[in-house]
Protein backbone atom coordinates (compact mmCIF):
# COMPACT_ATOMS: atom_id res chain seq x y z
CA UNK A 1 0.00 0.00 0.00
CA UNK A 2 2.84 2.36 0.84
CA UNK A 3 4.51 1.63 -2.51
CA UNK A 4 1.20 2.15 -4.33
CA UNK A 5 0.68 5.49 -2.55
CA UNK A 6 4.22 6.59 -3.41
CA UNK A 7 3.74 5.71 -7.09
CA UNK A 8 0.45 7.64 -7.13
CA UNK A 9 2.11 10.66 -5.55
CA UNK A 10 4.92 10.62 -8.09
CA UNK A 11 2.42 10.33 -10.93
CA UNK A 12 0.41 13.25 -9.54
CA UNK A 13 3.54 15.38 -9.16
CA UNK A 14 4.53 14.58 -12.72
CA UNK A 15 1.11 15.59 -13.96
CA UNK A 16 1.43 18.87 -12.08
CA UNK A 17 4.84 19.56 -13.56
CA UNK A 18 3.50 18.90 -17.02
CA UNK A 19 0.42 21.08 -16.45
CA UNK A 20 2.34 24.16 -15.30
CA UNK A 21 4.35 24.71 -18.51
CA UNK A 22 1.22 23.89 -20.46
CA UNK A 23 -0.65 26.60 -18.58
CA UNK A 24 2.19 29.08 -19.17
CA UNK A 25 2.17 28.23 -22.86
CA UNK A 26 -1.49 29.22 -23.03
CA UNK A 27 -0.85 32.74 -21.76
CA UNK A 28 0.96 35.89 -22.88
CA UNK A 29 2.25 38.03 -20.03
CA UNK A 30 1.98 41.81 -20.34
CA UNK A 31 4.09 43.99 -18.04
CA UNK A 32 2.58 47.15 -16.54
CA UNK A 33 5.29 49.51 -15.26
CA UNK A 34 3.58 52.60 -13.85
CA UNK A 35 3.94 54.39 -10.50
CA UNK A 36 1.04 53.61 -8.18
CA UNK A 37 2.54 55.61 -5.31
CA UNK A 38 4.71 58.70 -4.95
CA UNK A 39 4.55 62.04 -6.73
CA UNK A 40 3.70 60.59 -10.18
CA UNK A 41 0.84 58.34 -9.03
CA UNK A 42 -1.64 61.16 -9.77
CA UNK A 43 -0.89 60.63 -13.46
CA UNK A 44 0.43 57.09 -13.85
CA UNK A 45 -2.12 55.06 -11.91
CA UNK A 46 -4.70 55.90 -14.56
CA UNK A 47 -2.48 54.40 -17.26
CA UNK A 48 -2.17 51.18 -15.26
CA UNK A 49 -5.95 50.92 -15.24
CA UNK A 50 -6.07 51.73 -18.95
CA UNK A 51 -3.81 48.77 -19.78
CA UNK A 52 -5.85 46.47 -17.55
CA UNK A 53 -9.04 47.55 -19.31
CA UNK A 54 -7.51 46.93 -22.73
CA UNK A 55 -6.26 43.49 -21.66
CA UNK A 56 -9.72 42.60 -20.37
CA UNK A 57 -11.31 43.70 -23.64
CA UNK A 58 -8.77 41.78 -25.72
CA UNK A 59 -9.35 38.62 -23.70
CA UNK A 60 -13.10 39.03 -24.27
CA UNK A 61 -12.32 38.94 -28.00
CA UNK A 62 -10.55 35.61 -27.60
CA UNK A 63 -7.14 36.77 -26.46
CA UNK A 64 -4.16 36.91 -28.79
CA UNK A 65 -2.82 34.04 -30.93
CA UNK A 66 -5.35 31.86 -29.13
CA UNK A 67 -3.81 32.70 -25.75
CA UNK A 68 -5.06 34.66 -22.76
CA UNK A 69 -3.30 37.93 -21.90
CA UNK A 70 -2.18 38.08 -18.27
CA UNK A 71 -1.12 41.42 -16.75
CA UNK A 72 1.89 41.60 -14.45
CA UNK A 73 1.56 44.85 -12.50
CA UNK A 74 4.46 46.34 -10.52
CA UNK A 75 4.84 49.63 -8.65
CA UNK A 76 8.13 51.49 -9.24
CA UNK A 77 6.79 54.11 -6.80
CA UNK A 78 8.05 57.25 -8.60
CA UNK A 79 11.58 55.97 -7.84
CA UNK A 80 13.66 56.22 -11.02
CA UNK A 81 16.29 53.52 -10.25
CA UNK A 82 13.44 51.23 -9.14
CA UNK A 83 11.96 51.48 -12.64
CA UNK A 84 15.07 49.75 -14.02
CA UNK A 85 14.96 47.09 -11.29
CA UNK A 86 11.27 46.37 -11.89
CA UNK A 87 11.78 46.27 -15.67
CA UNK A 88 14.55 43.70 -15.22
CA UNK A 89 12.25 41.57 -13.06
CA UNK A 90 9.42 41.80 -15.58
CA UNK A 91 11.64 40.60 -18.43
CA UNK A 92 13.97 38.11 -16.68
CA UNK A 93 11.76 36.74 -13.92
CA UNK A 94 8.19 37.17 -15.14
CA UNK A 95 9.06 36.70 -18.84
CA UNK A 96 6.63 39.32 -20.09
CA UNK A 97 6.33 39.70 -23.86
CA UNK A 98 5.88 43.47 -23.73
CA UNK A 99 5.87 46.31 -21.21
CA UNK A 100 3.55 49.30 -21.18
CA UNK A 101 5.08 51.84 -18.87
CA UNK A 102 6.81 54.99 -17.64
CA UNK A 103 5.67 58.60 -17.62
CA UNK A 104 8.70 60.75 -16.92
CA UNK A 105 11.70 60.71 -19.21
CA UNK A 106 14.01 60.01 -16.29
CA UNK A 107 12.12 56.77 -15.65
CA UNK A 108 12.27 55.86 -19.35
CA UNK A 109 16.01 56.64 -19.46
CA UNK A 110 16.44 54.38 -16.45
CA UNK A 111 14.62 51.50 -18.14
CA UNK A 112 16.12 51.88 -21.64
CA UNK A 113 19.50 50.15 -21.05
CA UNK A 114 17.72 47.22 -19.40
CA UNK A 115 15.43 46.84 -22.42
CA UNK A 116 18.39 46.91 -24.80
CA UNK A 117 20.47 44.52 -22.70
CA UNK A 118 17.69 41.94 -22.35
CA UNK A 119 16.02 42.67 -25.69
CA UNK A 120 12.73 43.64 -24.07
CA UNK A 121 9.97 45.67 -25.72
CA UNK A 122 8.25 48.73 -24.23
CA UNK A 123 5.56 51.19 -25.33
CA UNK A 124 6.00 54.69 -23.92
CA UNK A 125 2.76 56.74 -23.98
CA UNK A 126 3.65 60.25 -22.82
CA UNK A 127 4.78 63.49 -24.47
CA UNK A 128 8.54 63.93 -24.12
CA UNK A 129 11.66 65.70 -25.37
CA UNK A 130 12.61 63.35 -28.21
CA UNK A 131 16.37 63.17 -28.84
CA UNK A 132 16.20 59.39 -28.57
CA UNK A 133 15.31 56.37 -30.64
CA UNK A 134 15.75 52.82 -29.38
CA UNK A 135 14.97 49.63 -31.26
CA UNK A 136 13.33 48.36 -28.07
CA UNK A 137 10.93 51.27 -27.48
CA UNK A 138 7.92 52.56 -29.41
CA UNK A 139 7.10 56.16 -28.57
CA UNK A 140 3.36 56.81 -28.80
CA UNK A 141 3.37 60.18 -27.00
CA UNK A 142 4.17 63.51 -28.64
CA UNK A 143 7.65 64.61 -29.72
CA UNK A 144 8.45 68.36 -29.43
CA UNK A 145 7.40 69.01 -33.05
CA UNK A 146 3.99 67.51 -32.20
CA UNK A 147 3.33 69.60 -29.07
CA UNK A 148 5.89 72.18 -27.94
CA UNK A 149 6.68 73.83 -31.29
CA UNK A 150 3.02 74.11 -32.42
CA UNK A 151 2.12 75.56 -28.99
CA UNK A 152 4.77 78.28 -29.32
CA UNK A 153 3.56 79.08 -32.84
CA UNK A 154 0.01 79.45 -31.53
CA UNK A 155 1.13 81.79 -28.74
CA UNK A 156 3.12 83.97 -31.14
CA UNK A 157 0.78 83.98 -34.13
CA UNK A 158 -2.64 83.87 -32.49
CA UNK A 159 -2.12 85.52 -29.09
CA UNK A 160 0.72 87.92 -29.93
CA UNK A 161 3.00 86.69 -27.13
CA UNK A 162 6.50 88.19 -27.13
CA UNK A 163 7.86 87.18 -23.68
CA UNK A 164 8.07 83.59 -22.48
CA UNK A 165 8.44 81.89 -19.11
CA UNK A 166 9.69 78.32 -19.47
CA UNK A 167 8.69 76.69 -16.16
CA UNK A 168 9.48 73.04 -15.63
CA UNK A 169 10.20 70.24 -13.20
CA UNK A 170 13.95 69.69 -12.85
CA UNK A 171 14.68 66.62 -14.95
CA UNK A 172 15.56 65.64 -18.51
CA UNK A 173 12.20 66.22 -20.26
CA UNK A 174 11.70 69.88 -19.27
CA UNK A 175 15.39 70.74 -19.61
CA UNK A 176 15.76 69.24 -23.09
CA UNK A 177 12.39 70.53 -24.29
CA UNK A 178 13.22 74.03 -23.05
CA UNK A 179 16.64 73.84 -24.71
CA UNK A 180 14.83 73.15 -27.99
CA UNK A 181 12.28 75.89 -27.30
CA UNK A 182 14.96 78.48 -26.45
CA UNK A 183 16.68 77.77 -29.77
CA UNK A 184 13.37 77.92 -31.61
CA UNK A 185 12.26 81.16 -29.93
CA UNK A 186 15.57 82.82 -30.78
CA UNK A 187 15.17 81.67 -34.39
CA UNK A 188 11.80 83.49 -34.34
CA UNK A 189 13.45 86.72 -33.21
CA UNK A 190 12.73 86.50 -29.46
CA UNK A 191 15.77 87.91 -27.55
CA UNK A 192 17.27 86.12 -24.55
CA UNK A 193 16.10 88.87 -22.18
CA UNK A 194 12.51 87.97 -23.03
CA UNK A 195 12.94 84.33 -22.04
CA UNK A 196 12.77 83.39 -18.35
CA UNK A 197 13.62 79.81 -17.37
CA UNK A 198 12.77 78.23 -14.01
CA UNK A 199 13.06 74.67 -12.68
CA UNK A 200 11.61 73.15 -9.51
CA UNK A 201 11.94 69.72 -7.86
CA UNK A 202 9.35 66.97 -8.19
CA UNK A 203 6.55 67.51 -5.71
CA UNK A 204 7.20 71.26 -5.36
CA UNK A 205 4.53 72.65 -3.03
CA UNK A 206 5.52 76.26 -2.29
CA UNK A 207 4.98 78.38 -5.41
CA UNK A 208 4.47 81.80 -3.85
CA UNK A 209 7.84 83.37 -4.69
CA UNK A 210 8.12 81.70 -8.11
CA UNK A 211 4.65 82.82 -9.20
CA UNK A 212 5.50 86.29 -7.88
CA UNK A 213 8.58 86.32 -10.16
CA UNK A 214 6.44 85.22 -13.11
CA UNK A 215 3.96 87.99 -12.34
CA UNK A 216 6.78 90.57 -12.23
CA UNK A 217 8.29 89.26 -15.48
CA UNK A 218 4.91 89.59 -17.17
CA UNK A 219 4.24 93.14 -15.97
CA UNK A 220 6.56 94.93 -18.41
CA UNK A 221 3.88 95.95 -20.87
CA UNK A 222 4.71 93.11 -23.27
CA UNK A 223 2.38 90.14 -23.82
CA UNK A 224 3.78 87.25 -21.76
CA UNK A 225 2.93 83.55 -21.53
CA UNK A 226 4.09 80.59 -19.44
CA UNK A 227 5.07 77.33 -21.13
CA UNK A 228 4.72 74.71 -18.41
CA UNK A 229 6.55 71.40 -18.33
CA UNK A 230 5.72 70.96 -14.64
CA UNK A 231 4.95 67.31 -13.97
CA UNK A 232 2.97 65.35 -11.42
CA UNK A 233 1.19 66.56 -8.31
CA UNK A 234 3.18 69.83 -8.23
CA UNK A 235 0.68 71.15 -10.77
CA UNK A 236 -2.08 71.39 -8.15
CA UNK A 237 -0.37 74.00 -5.88
CA UNK A 238 1.08 75.78 -8.95
CA UNK A 239 -2.33 76.50 -10.43
CA UNK A 240 -3.75 77.35 -7.01
CA UNK A 241 -1.02 79.93 -6.51
CA UNK A 242 -1.71 81.46 -9.92
CA UNK A 243 -5.29 81.97 -8.79
CA UNK A 244 -4.20 83.26 -5.37
CA UNK A 245 -2.08 85.95 -7.01
CA UNK A 246 -4.81 86.90 -9.45
CA UNK A 247 -3.02 85.78 -12.61
CA UNK A 248 -5.73 85.18 -15.20
CA UNK A 249 -5.44 83.71 -18.66
CA UNK A 250 -5.99 87.21 -20.10
CA UNK A 251 -3.00 88.55 -18.14
CA UNK A 252 -0.46 85.71 -18.52
CA UNK A 253 -1.80 82.61 -20.27
CA UNK A 254 -0.25 79.30 -19.26
CA UNK A 255 0.06 76.55 -21.86
CA UNK A 256 0.79 73.21 -20.20
CA UNK A 257 2.30 70.08 -21.73
CA UNK A 258 1.69 67.77 -18.76
CA UNK A 259 -1.73 68.82 -17.47
CA UNK A 260 -4.75 66.95 -18.74
CA UNK A 261 -8.22 66.07 -17.60
CA UNK A 262 -6.91 63.72 -14.89
CA UNK A 263 -4.80 66.41 -13.21
CA UNK A 264 -7.59 68.99 -13.44
CA UNK A 265 -10.06 66.63 -11.77
CA UNK A 266 -8.27 67.23 -8.48
CA UNK A 267 -8.56 71.03 -8.34
CA UNK A 268 -11.09 73.84 -8.61
CA UNK A 269 -10.77 74.85 -12.27
CA UNK A 270 -13.01 77.92 -12.22
CA UNK A 271 -10.14 80.41 -11.66
CA UNK A 272 -8.15 78.65 -14.41
CA UNK A 273 -10.68 79.04 -17.21
CA UNK A 274 -8.91 80.17 -20.39
CA UNK A 275 -5.49 78.76 -19.55
CA UNK A 276 -4.27 76.32 -22.19
CA UNK A 277 -2.87 72.87 -22.78
CA UNK A 278 -1.31 71.38 -25.89
CA UNK A 279 -2.01 67.70 -26.48
CA UNK A 280 -2.92 65.28 -29.25
CA UNK A 281 -6.22 64.30 -27.65
CA UNK A 282 -8.95 65.87 -25.53
CA UNK A 283 -11.86 64.02 -23.97
CA UNK A 284 -14.20 66.71 -25.32
CA UNK A 285 -13.46 65.87 -28.98
CA UNK A 286 -16.68 64.62 -30.58
CA UNK A 287 -16.07 61.46 -32.63
CA UNK A 288 -17.83 58.07 -32.54
CA UNK A 289 -14.55 56.36 -31.62
CA UNK A 290 -13.97 58.70 -28.69
CA UNK A 291 -17.56 58.40 -27.48
CA UNK A 292 -17.17 54.62 -27.42
CA UNK A 293 -13.83 54.80 -25.59
CA UNK A 294 -15.18 57.17 -22.93
CA UNK A 295 -18.23 54.96 -22.37
CA UNK A 296 -16.03 51.86 -21.97
CA UNK A 297 -13.73 53.68 -19.54
CA UNK A 298 -16.55 54.93 -17.30
CA UNK A 299 -18.06 51.43 -17.25
CA UNK A 300 -14.70 49.83 -16.42
CA UNK A 301 -14.10 52.28 -13.57
CA UNK A 302 -17.72 52.05 -12.37
CA UNK A 303 -17.56 55.83 -12.18
CA UNK A 304 -19.71 58.16 -14.33
CA UNK A 305 -17.28 60.99 -13.50
CA UNK A 306 -14.12 59.16 -14.61
CA UNK A 307 -12.17 61.21 -17.17
CA UNK A 308 -9.95 60.26 -20.10
CA UNK A 309 -6.78 62.00 -21.27
CA UNK A 310 -4.03 62.10 -23.89
CA UNK A 311 -1.62 59.47 -22.47
CA UNK A 312 -4.59 57.11 -22.19
CA UNK A 313 -5.22 57.50 -25.91
CA UNK A 314 -1.51 56.97 -26.61
CA UNK A 315 -1.67 53.78 -24.51
CA UNK A 316 -4.82 52.68 -26.38
CA UNK A 317 -3.19 53.20 -29.79
CA UNK A 318 0.07 51.54 -28.75
CA UNK A 319 -1.68 48.52 -27.25
CA UNK A 320 -3.83 47.94 -30.31
CA UNK A 321 -0.87 48.38 -32.65
CA UNK A 322 1.05 45.81 -30.59
CA UNK A 323 -1.87 43.37 -30.86
CA UNK A 324 -2.01 43.84 -34.64
CA UNK A 325 1.78 43.51 -34.95
CA UNK A 326 1.75 40.25 -32.96
CA UNK A 327 -0.99 38.93 -35.23
CA UNK A 328 1.01 39.95 -38.30
CA UNK A 329 4.21 38.37 -36.96
CA UNK A 330 2.39 35.29 -35.67
CA UNK A 331 4.54 35.45 -32.55
CA UNK A 332 5.40 37.65 -29.56
CA UNK A 333 9.11 37.41 -30.39
CA UNK A 334 10.49 40.92 -29.85
CA UNK A 335 12.51 41.14 -33.08
CA UNK A 336 9.60 39.91 -35.19
CA UNK A 337 7.10 42.24 -33.50
CA UNK A 338 9.47 45.22 -33.87
CA UNK A 339 9.61 44.69 -37.63
CA UNK A 340 5.85 44.19 -37.84
CA UNK A 341 5.17 47.38 -35.85
CA UNK A 342 6.70 49.73 -38.42
CA UNK A 343 3.96 50.98 -40.72
CA UNK A 344 1.15 49.84 -38.42
CA UNK A 345 -1.97 52.01 -38.65
CA UNK A 346 -4.72 52.53 -36.12
CA UNK A 347 -7.49 55.15 -35.87
CA UNK A 348 -6.94 58.10 -33.53
CA UNK A 349 -9.79 58.76 -31.13
CA UNK A 350 -9.83 62.35 -32.40
CA UNK A 351 -10.07 61.35 -36.06
CA UNK A 352 -7.58 60.43 -38.74
CA UNK A 353 -5.09 57.61 -38.68
CA UNK A 354 -2.06 57.10 -36.46
CA UNK A 355 0.88 55.56 -38.35
CA UNK A 356 4.03 54.11 -36.75
CA UNK A 357 7.09 55.55 -38.45
CA UNK A 358 10.47 54.01 -39.21
CA UNK A 359 11.89 55.98 -36.27
CA UNK A 360 9.42 54.30 -33.85
CA UNK A 361 7.45 57.57 -33.46
CA UNK A 362 3.75 57.99 -34.26
CA UNK A 363 2.13 60.47 -36.59
CA UNK A 364 -0.32 62.48 -34.49
CA UNK A 365 -2.73 65.42 -34.76
CA UNK A 366 -1.93 68.45 -32.58
CA UNK A 367 -4.64 70.19 -30.55
CA UNK A 368 -4.60 73.23 -28.27
CA UNK A 369 -7.42 73.56 -25.77
CA UNK A 370 -8.70 76.06 -23.24
CA UNK A 371 -9.54 74.91 -19.72
CA UNK A 372 -13.26 75.06 -19.02
CA UNK A 373 -14.93 75.42 -15.62
CA UNK A 374 -15.96 71.75 -15.72
CA UNK A 375 -12.36 70.55 -15.98
CA UNK A 376 -12.59 69.79 -19.68
CA UNK A 377 -10.89 71.48 -22.63
CA UNK A 378 -12.41 73.34 -25.55
CA UNK A 379 -10.29 72.93 -28.66
CA UNK A 380 -9.26 76.36 -29.96
CA UNK A 381 -6.73 75.24 -32.58
CA UNK A 382 -5.70 72.04 -34.31
CA UNK A 383 -3.65 70.83 -37.25
CA UNK A 384 -5.37 69.99 -40.52
CA UNK A 385 -3.66 66.59 -40.65
CA UNK A 386 -1.47 64.30 -38.58
CA UNK A 387 2.14 65.33 -37.96
CA UNK A 388 4.93 62.70 -38.12
CA UNK A 389 7.07 62.67 -34.98
CA UNK A 390 10.69 63.83 -35.28
CA UNK A 391 13.09 61.77 -33.19
CA UNK A 392 15.80 64.44 -33.40
CA UNK A 393 15.20 68.19 -33.36
CA UNK A 394 16.17 70.38 -36.29
CA UNK A 395 16.76 73.28 -33.87
CA UNK A 396 19.69 71.80 -31.94
CA UNK A 397 23.09 71.89 -33.65
CA UNK A 398 23.99 68.51 -32.18
CA UNK A 399 21.00 66.75 -33.74
CA UNK A 400 19.95 68.70 -36.84
CA UNK A 401 21.72 66.20 -39.11
CA UNK A 402 20.59 63.12 -37.17
CA UNK A 403 17.72 60.80 -38.10
CA UNK A 404 16.39 57.49 -36.81
CA UNK A 405 15.41 54.73 -39.22
CA UNK A 406 14.98 51.16 -38.00
CA UNK A 407 14.57 49.67 -41.48
CA UNK A 408 17.22 48.30 -43.82
CA UNK A 409 19.78 49.46 -44.86
CA UNK A 410 20.11 52.10 -42.09
CA UNK A 411 18.81 50.17 -39.04
CA UNK A 412 19.94 52.89 -36.67
CA UNK A 413 18.44 55.25 -34.11
CA UNK A 414 21.21 57.83 -34.42
CA UNK A 415 22.25 58.11 -38.06
CA UNK A 416 24.23 61.12 -39.31
CA UNK A 417 22.94 62.07 -42.76
CA UNK A 418 26.13 64.02 -43.52
CA UNK A 419 28.79 61.50 -42.47
CA UNK A 420 26.53 58.50 -43.29
CA UNK A 421 27.59 56.97 -39.99
CA UNK A 422 25.53 55.24 -37.28
CA UNK A 423 26.58 55.94 -33.72
CA UNK A 424 24.17 53.55 -32.04
CA UNK A 425 20.58 53.59 -30.88
CA UNK A 426 20.89 56.76 -28.80
Image (cartoon, helix red, strand yellow):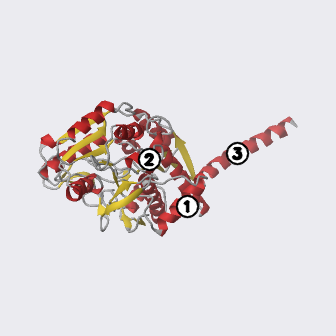
User: In the rendering, at what x and y percent does residue 396 appear?
Assistant: 17, 48
Residue at image x 63%, y 52%?
22
Residue at image x 15%, y 43%?
194
User: In the rendering, at what x and y percent does residue 148 appear?
Assistant: 27, 52
Q: Which quadrant of the view contains residue 210?
A: top left
Q: Is residue 143 visible?
A: yes
Label 3 environment density (alpha carbons within 10 Å; few <14, some 14–19, many ≥20): few
Local SS, label 1: helix
Label 1 environment density (alpha carbons within 10 Å; few <14, some 14–19, many ≥20): few
Local SS, label 3: helix
Decide: marks 3, 2 in contact (CB < 8 A)? no
Q: Is residue 64 visible?
A: no
Which label was assigned to residue 16? 3
Query: In the rendered structure, which disc, 2 or 1, sits on the residue that comes first in sequence?
Result: 2
Query: In the rendered structure, which disc, 1 or 3, sits on the residue that comes first in sequence?
Result: 3
Query: In the rendered structure, which disc, 3 or 2, sits on the residue that comes first in sequence?
Result: 3
Which label was assigned to residue 148? none
Q: Mark 1 = which residue? A: 295
The residues tagged by marks 3 and 2 sit, at their Cα atoms, a distance apart of 51 Å
User: In the rendering, at what x and y percent does residue 420 appear?
Assistant: 16, 55
Q: Which quadrant of the view contains residue 388?
A: bottom left
| Quarter of the figure with the N terminus | top right
Vertically, is 50 above or below 80? below
User: In the rendering, at what x and y percent does residue 404 appear?
Assistant: 26, 55
Q: Nearer the viewer, mark 1 or mark 3?
A: 1
Which label was assigned to residue 264? 2
Label 2 environment density (alpha carbons within 10 Å; few <14, some 14–19, many ≥20): many
Q: Pick whichever, 188 or 15, lies toward us.
A: 188
Decide: marks 1, 3 in contact (CB < 8 A)? no
The residues tagged by marks 2 and 1 sit, at their Cα atoms, a distance apart of 20 Å
Amino acid sequence: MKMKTLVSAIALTGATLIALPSLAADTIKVGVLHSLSGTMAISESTLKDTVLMLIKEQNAKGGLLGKKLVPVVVDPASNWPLFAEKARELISKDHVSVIFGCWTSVSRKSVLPVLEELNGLMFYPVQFEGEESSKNIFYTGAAPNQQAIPAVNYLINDLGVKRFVLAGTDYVYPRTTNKILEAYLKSKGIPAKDIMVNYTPFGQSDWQSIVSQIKQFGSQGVKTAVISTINGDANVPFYKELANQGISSEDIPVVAFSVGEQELSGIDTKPLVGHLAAWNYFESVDTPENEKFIKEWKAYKHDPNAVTNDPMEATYIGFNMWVDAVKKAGTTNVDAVEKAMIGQKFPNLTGGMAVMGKNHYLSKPVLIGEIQDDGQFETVWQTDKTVPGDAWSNYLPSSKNIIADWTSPINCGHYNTVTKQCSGGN
